[in-house]
Image (tube, rainbow, N blue to C red):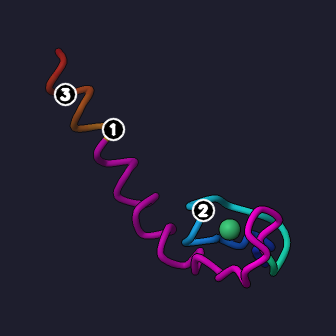
């Protein structure tokens, strides 16, 4: 899956362009691979949360 999302660390905003529309500085790609393991464990975190509630 290809990500077309860029991130401006100056404005702390996500954008779809390689240049920030607010400050005109080059944006960076927030490396979406970092989010997949978190997603995987997020499922278990939610399960744990449900267990704690009951
Ligand atoms: Zn910016």
Magenta segment includes 30: yes
Which type of secondary structure does the marked residue at label 3 adopt? helix
Residue 3 or 8: which is nearer the viewer?
8
Residue 48 or 19: which is nearer the viewer?
19
Q: Write the start and end of the magenta stretch as one range.
A: 20-45
Give the mark nearer the N terminus: 3 vs 1.
1
Residue 1 or 31: which is nearer the viewer?
31
Residue 42 is left or right of residue 13, and the answer is left
Can you tell me which quadrant of the image ligand 1 is in?
A: bottom right
Mark 2 sits near ligand 1, with its Cβ under 8 Å away: yes
Q: In the figure, 18 relative to 38: above or below?
A: below
Task: Estimate the spatial distance between the alpha carbons at disc 2 and disc 3, rounded to whole Å.
Answer: 39 Å
Task: Estimate the spatial distance between the alpha carbons at disc 3 and disc 1, rounded to whole Å.
Answer: 9 Å
Q: Quadrant of the N terminus?
A: bottom right
Q: Mark 1 — residue?
A: 46
Residue 30 is left or right of residue 27, and the answer is left
Seen at 85% across and 73% down, the residue is: 17
Q: State the image quarter where residue 40 is shown.
A: bottom left
Which type of secondary structure does the marked residue at label 2 adopt? loop
Q: Position of residue 24 (x, y in %)?
A: 79, 75
Q: Position of residue 44 (x, y in %)?
A: 31, 48
Q: Mark 2 — residue?
A: 11
Q: State the image quarter where residue 41 is shown.
A: bottom left
Q: Position of residue 34 (x, y in %)?
A: 47, 75
Badge 2 crowding class, 10 Å Cα cut-off, few under 14, some 14 to 19, many 20 or more, is few
Mark 1 sits near ligand 1, with its Cβ under 8 Å away: no
Which type of secondary structure does the marked residue at label 1 adopt? helix
Q: In the figure, 51 relative to 9: above or below?
A: above
Residue 45 or 34: which is nearer the viewer?
34
Q: Mark 3 — residue?
A: 51
């Amino acid at each position: 899956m290809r990500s077309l999302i860029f991130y401006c660390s100056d404005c702390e905003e996500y954008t779809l362009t390689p240049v920030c529309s607010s400050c005109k500085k080059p944006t960076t790609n927030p490396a979406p691979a970092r989010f997949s393991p978190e997603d995987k464990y997020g499922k278990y975190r939610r399960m744990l949360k449900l267990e704690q509630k009951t």
